[in-house]
Image (cartoon, grey):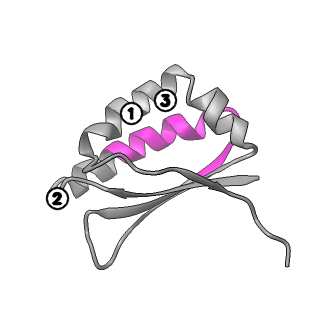
Amino acid sequence: MVQETFLLEVKPGTEQDFEQAFQKAANLVHAAHGCLGSELKRCVEQENKYLVAIEWETVEDHVVHFKNSPAFEELKALIGPYYLHPPTVEHYQEVQI
């Protein structure tokens, strides 16, 4: 399993609209092949900043299958207009210690 994570800043004043749009976008992600779930967390210190975490079975499920699907284009149309700037997406795997 891998976790896709990114910090996202939305345009100030659009937080509630973004959260509603993200809920619709999450349905698209959850229906994607290899998606295991997602989380959206709002920053306490900066209301327009969010932490997004999406769990995938493999990196390829995200970057090959989902990002090349019509659902990804629909996701961008839903939440893209709220971005203050494009986020940097990274993938993480659990380390056994």
Q: Secondary structure at mark 2?
A: loop
**Is 85 on the left or on the right of 11, as rendered?**
right
Task: Say which residue label 3 marks.
Answer: 72
In space, the residues marked 1 and 3 are separated at their CA atoms by 6 Å
Q: Secondary structure at mark 3?
A: helix
* Residue at image location 43% in from the left, 39% down from the top: 25
Task: Say which residue label 1 marks.
Answer: 76
Q: Find residue 16 and report its horizontal and vertical position in percent.
A: 24, 55
Residue type at mark 1: give it. Lys
Task: Say which residue label 2 marks.
Answer: 12
Q: Are marks 1 and 3 in contact (CB under 8 Å)?
A: yes
Q: Is residue 34 visible?
A: no
Q: Find residue 85 and report its horizontal and vertical position in percent.
A: 29, 48
Circle 3 crowding by C-alpha within 10 Å: few under 14, some 14–19, many from 20: some
Q: Are marks 3 and 2 in contact (CB under 8 Å)?
A: no
Q: Is residue 66 magenta?
A: no
In space, the residues marked 3 and 2 are separated at their CA atoms by 24 Å
* Residue at image location 32% in from the left, 64% down from the top: 49
Residue type at mark 2: give it. Pro
Residue occupying the far top of the picture: 70
Circle 1 crowding by C-alpha within 10 Å: few under 14, some 14–19, many from 20: few
